[in-house]
Amino acid sequence: GVGSPVLTMDGNIISSGVALNLSGGNHIFNCSLASSQNYSYSENVSNFTIDKLNGDVKLYLNGIEDNVTVAYPQQYNITATTLYGTVIIYKDGVDITSNNGKNVTPSMNSGYYNITAVSSGNENHSSLSMTRWLNVTLDAISPSIEITSPQDGGSYGYNMSLPLNYIVTD
């Protein structure tokens, strides 16, 4: 045909023979030649899929990449990081990202809590999530209370002022 071919990638004109950096995803290449007095329009369209690399997310409970058990009122720390995109942290489905890296005192409710970190990924890396379990336990040993005075079984008068002394251990 007569004329100059037009090469496009994803609808944008590009130059032939120039190296391209392609992000992950689908890309459409089109090479077309306009019609002329003696030739009809012609084009060649090719679709290419560039696979994304695996994403990255790290989830630490109290500084380790594992499930953790804490006894109330011991504090815990949830920290999540990603190399690609942004990270969101969920505790039982509720966004707690604002507590990322902070020490937190648990409520006085024992239980297992699902902690999930989600990395958004970016144009070349897929999203990824990581789940760990935080187990909060209550103190299973009751405190010991010993009354040291007044003495058990002692005899005391009516309306008498008595000192009350005790020892409490846990």
Image (cartoon, helix red, strand yellow):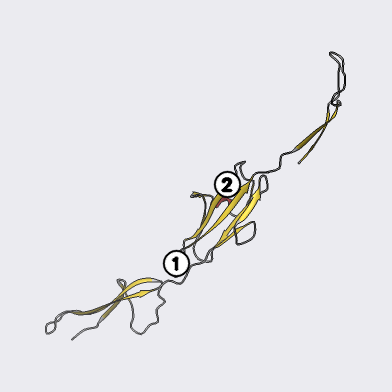
Taking the spot 71% from the left edge, 39% from the top edge, the residue there is: 142
Q: Residue 28 lies in what quarter of the image? A: bottom left
Instruction: Give residue 53's position: percent from left, percent from top.
Output: 45, 72
Question: Which is more foreground, mark 1 or mark 2?
Answer: 2
Q: Disc 2 marks which residue?
A: 111
Q: Is residue 157 left or right of residue 92?
A: right
Classify 10 Å Cα crowding around label 2: few (below 14), some (14-19), many (20 and above). few
Callout 1: helix, strand or loop? Answer: loop
Taking the spot 50% from the left edge, 60% from the top edge, the residue there is: 86
Q: Disc 1 marks which residue?
A: 126
User: In the image shown, does 69 or 33 lie closer to the viewer?
Assistant: 69
User: In the image shown, does 24 or 144 lie closer to the viewer?
Assistant: 144
Q: CA distance from mark 1 to mark 2?
A: 32 Å
Q: Is residue 148 left or right of residue 59?
A: right
Q: Is residue 141 above or below residue 125?
A: above
Callout 2: helix, strand or loop? Answer: strand
Say whether residue 7 is visible: yes
Instruction: Give residue 119's position: percent from left, percent from top.
Output: 49, 61
Task: Identify which amino acid the numbered label 2 is placed on.
Answer: Gly
Say whether residue 101 is visible: no
Task: Identify which amino acid the numbered label 1 is placed on.
Answer: Ser
Instruction: Give residue 1's position: percent from left, percent from top.
Output: 18, 86
